[in-house]
Image (cartoon, rainbow, N blue to C red):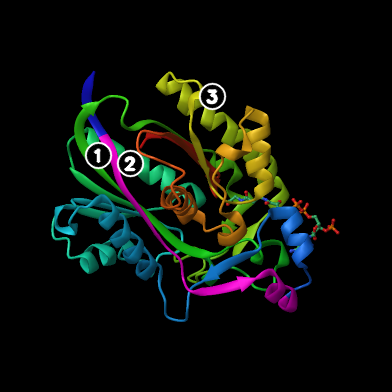
Amino acid sequence: MMALRSVLLGVGGHLPERVLTNAELAERVDTSDEWIVARTGIRERRIAADGEKTSDLAIKAARAALEHAGRDAHDVDLIIVATATPDLTFPATAARVQAALGVVKGAAFDLQAVCSGFIFALATADNFLAREQAKLALVIGAETFSRIVDWEDRGTCVLFGDGAGAVVLEAQTCDTQRGVISTFLRTDGRMHDLLYVDGGPSETQTTGKLRMIGNAVFRQAVEHISGAMLEACARAGVSIDTVDWFVPHQANQRILDGVARRLGIPVEKVISTVAVHGNTSAASVPLALDAGVSDGRIKKGDLVLMEALGGGLTWGAALVRM
Ligand code: UT7
């Protein structure tokens, strides 16, 4: 059956040059490489250089995705930047990205769902394309969490990194099995104080620092992520066994393993970049997707299930045929 679909034409990523190792962190706070690797799987993460902004990373990831898609920036008519670390309070980081790419049509806006941001942005773009309100969309996850991490707090500063990933989606009338097949999004604001930043323009007139009750978030993660993945599959009428690749939010290797165990997913089907990226929040899913596509594991025609959970709490999943 033919239908209007959001087809994923290209993916790209960008990481800052500076690598921050566990050994370097152990010189700053009371931690160790052994603890970080055993509890999270993280070995190193990237940190933006002084003056390097979220938009700088987003622009580079967007250019890489457009090149991979073989599309010109001038044809883009929708840009959504998922970020919790915008360059400024306003205007949207997406507006800067749009200007830098030379895009002069359509809308560009930021979307805030913290670590789930890319999944929320993908679902939002899919709805715009399905309603024929846009034709060619750039969906970007970009973060500089190094700017909001409390570098004195060993419970959080070892977890996060900077980076950006992007995809190009085009509305195409094609076989219904291609493109974004289903999405599932959830927010439960009752858990807003498990993971938050303790500053903002309205409440404190400061930027604030990231605060997290890590083990409480961990307990929510495996259950809600598993549920979201099953729901996205159920909405598409596909069995989770038929999924070729799982592209999870890269918060903690133990969460990836826990979800895989719970759903009976072979670990070889799970793309993991957490060891070298850490948790890059909204950038983590597109960066992991980019890694899987770049090294040839994820191929055209493969069924890919992405998922994330983050502050809000927010969580969700997206099923895409590449
Ligand atoms: O991306 C958004 C979603 N975020 C997540 O999904 C993160 C979810 N949470 C986690 O990944 C884990 O909870 C953490 C990695 C943050 C923590 O691991 P945990 O196994 O849940 O440890 P815990 O918080 O229960 O802490 C255990 C112990 C504590 O010591 P005591 O109180 O038992 O003496 C902590 O103080 O580990 C201690 N600890 C550390 N020790 C060495 C906490 N951070 C560190 C550290 N190095 N960096």
Q: Amino acid at mark 3?
A: Asp
Task: Report whether the residue tagged 2 is closer than 8 Å to ligand 1.
Answer: no
Question: Would you say the residues marked 1 and 2 are in contact, meaning their CB atoms lie under 8 Å apart?
Answer: yes
Residue 54: % across, % down: 40, 67
Which secondary structure lies at badge 3? helix
Residue 102: % across, % down: 17, 65
Q: Measure how far apart labels 1 and 2 are at the Cα level.
A: 6 Å
User: Which mark lies nearer to you, 1 or 3?
Assistant: 3
Q: Amino acid at mark 1?
A: Phe
Which secondary structure lies at badge 2? helix
User: Of callouts 2 and 3, which one flags the residue occurring earlier in the amino acid sequence?
Assistant: 2
Q: Is residue 61 left or right of residue 210?
A: left
Q: Is residue 240 left or right of residue 64?
A: right
Residue pointed to by mark 3? 241
Can I make out residue 227 in this image? Answer: yes
Farthest residue in the front direction? 296
Classify the position of the C terminus by image quarter: top left
| Nearer to the camera, 181 or 178 | 178
Crowd band around label 2 with a 10 angstrom C-alpha radius: few (<14), some (14–19), many (20+): some
Residue pointed to by mark 2? 124
Question: Would you say the residues marked 2 and 3 are in contact, meaning their CB atoms lie under 8 Å apart?
Answer: no
Residues drawn in magenta:
6-28
Taking the magenta stretch, the answer to whether it contains residue 184 is no
Q: How many marks?
A: 3
Residue 74: % across, % down: 14, 58
Crowd band around label 3 with a 10 angstrom C-alpha radius: few (<14), some (14–19), many (20+): few
Residue pointed to by mark 1? 128
Q: Is residue 216 left or right of residue 121?
A: right
Q: Residue at x 29, y 53 (%)?
A: 68
Q: Residue at x 30, y 38 (%)?
A: 126
Crowd band around label 1 with a 10 angstrom C-alpha radius: few (<14), some (14–19), many (20+): some
Q: Amino acid at mark 2?
A: Thr
